[in-house]
Structure formats: C-alpha cells, structure tokens
Image (spheres, coloured by chain):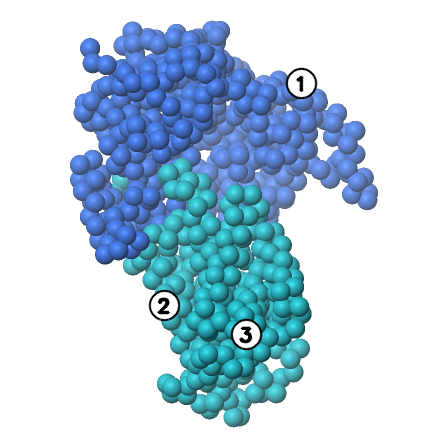
Chain colours: A blue, B cyan
Amino acid sequence: MAELLVEMTGISKSFPGVHALDDCRFELRPGEVHALVGENGAGKSTLMKVLSGIYKRDAGTIKVKGVEVEITSPRAAQDLGISIIHQELNLMGHLTVAQNIFIGREPRGAAPFLLDEKTLNAKARELFETLHLKLDPRARVSSLAVAQQQMVEIAKALSFSSAVLIMDEPTAALTDTEIDELFRIIRHLRDQGKGIVHISHRLEELKQISNRITVMRDGRFIATVNTADAEIQQIISMMVGRTVFEATPELPEQRDPNVVLEVKGLNLGRQVRDISFSLHRGEILGIAGLVGAGRTEVVRAIFAADRPESGQVTINGKQVVIHGPSDAVHHGIAYLSEDRKRYGLALGMDVELNTVLASLRRFANGFGWVRTGATRKQALEQVQALAIKTPSIRQRVKNLSGGNQQKVVIAKWLTADTDILIFDEPTRGIDVGAKSEIYRLLNDLAKQGKSIIMISSELPEVLRMSHRILVMCEGRITGELSSAEATQEKIMTLATQREAVAAA
Amino acid sequence: MQTTSAPARSRAQSLLAGESIQRLLALAALVILLVFFSIVVPHFASTNNYIDILTATAVNGVLATGVTFVIITGGIDLSVGTGMTFTSVVMGIVSVNMGLPLPLGLLAALAAGALVGVINGALIAKAKLPPFIATLGMLYVTLGMAQVISDVHPIYFEGTQPSFQQFFMAKPVAGIPNIVWVMLGGAAIAWILLNKTILGRYTFALGSNEEATRLSGVNVDRWKIIIYAVDGLFIGLAGIVIASRMNSAQPGLGMGYELDAIAAAVIGGNSLSGGEGSVVGTIIGAFLISTLRIGLSVAGIPDQWKSVITGLVVIGAVWLDILRRRSRA
C-alpha cells in the first residue's frame, strides 16, 4: 500500500478556557475521499485548521508523506501541498476570478514589480480547461453566484498542485445539479491520486462520495470506518454518543379550522409572483423548493422586510397593512432568518440582551430605563424552557454553538409574544444532536397553538416536520401536498416545474 | 433554477457598470460647473481664472493622490495636511538652515514624508491601531514636530541653489506653473502603480477582503506599511509644492488640508469602505473642489458660504454614490 499522505497523531490544541482538541488522530491515503464528521464543537474544523497552518498545535506530530513536519503558516501548508477551502468563502469580491486565484503569485511583466495581466488570464484559462470548469477569468468575483464563487475557491486550491485538499461544508449553498458537478470534480481528483478531506453534516451525501468516515466528538477521535460498511444511524450514534430517536409530528386528529394567516396575490418582482396560501393555527407549513425559488423572498415580503408591490395579508380574519418589520412584530409575526449570525443575533452581545431584543419596550419604563431585573428573569426562564446550553445569560452569543444560537433567536421571538413564526432554514449549520432538539421545540410550539411556516432545503426535514407542504419554483407556488401524500419525488417534480410546463 | 455557466460579463463590462460611472458623473459635474460659472458669473471665463484653478489644485491634487492609496485599502489618513507642513519644514532646514543644495532638500522632504507614512503604516499594521486613530495621533505629532524643529518660525527660501520658487513656479508651458505638471506627473505615476504593479493589486485586494488576502499567503502587514509609505511620499511631494508656492515653509499651515484631500478622493468615486477607486477620479474631484471655490469667489460669494456649498457637494456626491450602488446590487 502506498504511504499515507497525511498522518496526524496525538494532536492537542487549547484556547483560553476551551480544550478544542485532545489527543486526536487522523490519516489520509492517496486516492481517497475521507469524510470528517462530528457535532458542532467536535473539533473537526479546528483539526483541519491545524493541518492547514492556520492554528499551531500544542502537542502531537504531523507527518506528510512519511516525513515529520512543522506547519507554521498557511503558506507553509501550501508549500507542503495542503490546500483548504473554508466554509466561508475567502475571496476578494472587487477583483477578478484570475486575480483571486493567483493572488500572491502574479506573473510578472517587464520589471519584477509590474503585472502581466495577459499571462495571468491565460494561466487561468489553462487551469479551467484541465478541471473542465466553465469560468471567465476576467469576471468580477462579486458578480458571480455562490456556486461559481465556490468553483473559484476550488480552482485556486487546486492551482497549487496540492496533494491534499480539505473542503469544509462545500455543499451547503449548492443545488443538487451543482453538487453533482462538484462530486464529479472530487472523483476526478481522487482518481488522480489526491487525498480529499470532506467535512460535512450531510450524511447521505457522504455515503455517496466518501471512502472512509472519521467521527469526532468533544475534541476527541472516536473512530474511522469504511463508508461501505457503515450505517447512517451508527455514525450518528458515534457522533452524538447516544441513540437519537426520530420524532414524527403528531398530527392533530382534526385540523384546527382557524386560519391565522391568509396571503392573497402577493407580488414582488420576479421572485414573488401571485402567491396565495393560508396558515392554520397549530400547523407546521413547510415550504420546499430549490435555492432561488423565491421562498425567502415570499416570507420577507409578508414580514415587510421588503415591501411587496401588491397583495393582501389577513391575520385572524382581519386584513392588515404591514409597512415594515416592526408592524409585522406588532401583529405577532416573527421571522427567523436564514443567516442567523447576520440577521438574527447581535453576536457581540450576551444571551440576555438578545432574548429581549425584539421586545425591549416592554422591559423599559416610561423614561426609557431598562429594567434589568425583568430582563434577567425573562432570559433565565427562556434558557430553561428551551434548554439553551450556555454557562450564563451573560455569555456572548457568538461563543455559543449554532444550535444554541438558534434557540436564542427562538427565545427572542417567543419573548416578543409572536404567534406566527416563520423559520427560514432552521437547522442550517446545526449538528444532528441539536437538530432533533430544534424539531422537538417546533413540535411543542405547534402543540401550544403557535403557527409555523418552515422553509427548508432538506427534503427529509420538510417531509418529517410538516403537516402540509407548499412547493415553489421560480417565484410561483407550483403545488401543495399533505403530509400523508408527500414524497421526495413529488416535491422535486413540483420544485422543478417551470412555467413553460403546464400543470396536469 | 440556477445555471452553472458563468455570466459573460467581462472586466470591461463590469467596470462600466461600476465605479467608472462615479468618475464619469464627477467629470460631468465638473464640466457642468465650468459651463454654469462661465455663463452665470461675469469675468469667470478667462484664461487667468482657468490657470488659477489649475494652480489652486496642485497641492490638493498631490495630497489627494496619496490618500487615494490608503482609502482603497479601506483605511484613512488624517495626517496628510500637517504631515505636508512637516516635510516642507524639513526641506527648509536642509536647504536653508543647513545650506545644502536644493536637490538634497527635495530628497529630504520626500524622505520625511515616507517616514511619516512608515510610522502610520506600522502603527496600523503592527500595533493594530484603527487607521483613524493612528493618523489622528500623527496629525498632532507632525504638527508639533514641524513647530519644534523650526522653532515656530517660517523658513524663507531666499538664495537657494538653484532658486526654488523660480523652478517650480516657472511657467514654460502655456503659462501654467510647473507645479501643475508635477501634480499631473505624480498622478500618472500613481496610476501606473495602482493599475500595473503588484503594489496596486495588493492595495485593491487588501481593501476588498483583508482576511482573504492574508490567508492567501500575502504578507498583509508588510504591504500595508509600504502602501502608507507611498502615501507618505506624496505627502512629501505636496510639501515641496506648497513650499514653492509661498517660497517658504510655514509651520502654522497644514491642518485642514487633509479634509480637502479626502473630499476630493470621495467625490471622485473612491469608496471609504475600500476595494475600489481610482486616481483619475481623485484628480477630477480635486478640480471640482477648486472650480467650485474659485467660481464662487469670482461670483463674490463670501467665504462662509463657500464652505457650506463645498460641504453640500461632498454630501451630495457620496449620497449619489450610495444610491447608485444600491440600485446596482
């Protein structure tokens, strides 16, 4: 057997107050796709950041192609043939594709400090040809779609002729077609003898693409298994350390006839076209569709984060006009956005403040003085009710894991006394263990009489959680399915049913 | 449904849709202003006035060119005004007090400017001070140092070898003083640096996404210091220009010039958040400010109102830019 590309043993790494990695090991063979899984906070990103030179390990050894090495910086890792593609894209938006790829290695012109743009673009084109990528080297990166920006990152990583490629959650923002394309490229690289580390939460995908899977938990190495031999449940158990039950929503015997929200003829640009639907009390209404179908745009229009051009919104039988988010909240609508770090939380502030953020007026007296006794009590109640894992309510929200951050967002909206909760991708970037807690929470809220709209791109999630499913495609609602009749195939058919095709 | 093929926008097309528009708008505004003043204000449309405008732009043009580099990286430099005074005083000390030949004095001014730039850069890159704070501090330091080394006395450039003012204020071409050509030459060099060299590429990269640039293996700290040093060289050049206009180094001058420099850059389309901008836009912005001031002057508008109007123009220019960006997004 050929020697290992990478062999990490006994790796430990601590940050102030946190043991991120404890005696971890990891190995990578040439010509393999090795998946790395674990809950948020398990240490997988940290381990790979050690390998790629972003962090320095506290203890342990790293061998690259059999030789023990010290990886002191990202540049050093690159020189050793190790490239990493982060979850958050690291691109300079104002520069072109070619300029991004070759930053720091620009071909020089007549004098060593002069640039040679022509050669730069030519080299980029060469690179794209070998990878069978369709990219324009002179396109400004900020004008590209996310999937293409990801391709730029991949091309950049590969332009170093790296033997090792680390990919952190590469499929999170991609559609199925784009994922197929990405997997084709990954298989091509694997066949060339490269070693690929694939970090992902999407276990079904890993079954398709990986040769082996390594599980980490709480900063420790748990096990490495052959993908062919492993069952998803087994992997989940190892990740979580306990068996996780799959809860199905308990369908109410008789659907509550009360319509809490009714939307008629909502229009906004090309993304929201003549949308009409209704939401019943205690219902979980799933909205499925491909990325770009307009689901987020629809709920943003209802919430008036973007003002709709036309349409009627009726709440509990009364027609309302919503001028902006504060109106929406006043009417009891909550919007838990897709990107909770950007739009849902004040990351630098603590749990207490974030909890009362949408209802601060209630906690202030006439002069605007905030009654901290009341806010403390509220925050403590919510932390208990939602089982938010945090050392204290004074903890800065940015230090919490994704799942707990999401719970803080939910706490905020519950504190604001909202009855209609719109969840946009509620479990994105959240590990398996925390996901099931969020699902349980959603079920509980529905049972308590809250009405929920849930946008999700994960079909299993939509199928499992929704009483009813609306499917959208290119700005229109293409179909409605009840929980009983819905299947992944039916949803996909409706999600790809474009305007030209007439509905049967 | 998303497609996987790349959009066919070439760099040229992107540019046209982007910041070039701001430059064109600034140019259009300048032309409109000139035409407006020519029609409305008696005695405005004369060769003398145009030359006055060019001359008045010389100092600010050089300062604004230097500050453009820093603004594109997403930073700012408040010390350019007092820094300029400092470099002119250094030149005065070398050429007059120490009696050394004029070329050495010029070199000293440039070196002094570069020194100020390196200190700014080091404070920002190594000590991690926010650019606003670091350069604000250096504003006071250079203001004070200029007064310290000159003992708070102006230094007059009489009898230097060769004659200082004679050279820079001579008007061999079309009656336009040489300092205008110095400014335009400086702008040309800056354009080459920004668009054709590694320095320029990293300036834009830093401004667009500093962390991504750092993770790509570029020594961000080192390049920041170099960029602020280049800014410093232009500060030195401005010191030479302003000293030549008055044939003296005046330690009491300088504070306030930085605002005009930044205003010129911003009006010309340089975004304070970094990543985009141009020297051409800056120069147009500098001309716009001078035209406005001189036009209003000839029209007999009192100084107080000139300030108000200049301020409104800056606000208007940036507002337009923001509206344009939002519609593009």
The answer to whether residue A441 is seen in the rendering is yes
Query: Please, what secondary structure does the residue beneath circle 2 have?
Result: helix
Q: Chain of mark 2?
A: B
Q: Which residue is mark 1?
A: A384
Q: Which is closer to the viewer, label 1 or label 3? A: 3
Q: Is residue A343 left or right of residue B190?
A: right
Q: Residue at x 65, y 20 (%)?
A: A391
Disc 2 residue type (three-letter):
Ala
Disc 3 residue type (three-letter):
Val
What is the distance, in whole Å, between disc 2 and disc 1 at their CAs? 65 Å
Relative to residue B181, is residue B298 depicted above or below? Answer: below
Q: Residue furthest bottom?
A: B43
Q: Residue at x 48, y 19 (%)?
A: A58
**Residue neighbourhood size for the residue with mark 2, other residues' Cα within 10 Å, grouped as few (<14), some (14–19), many (≥20):** some
| Mark carried by residue B96 | 3
| Mark carried by residue B188 | 2
For the residues tagged 1 and 3, is the chain the same? no
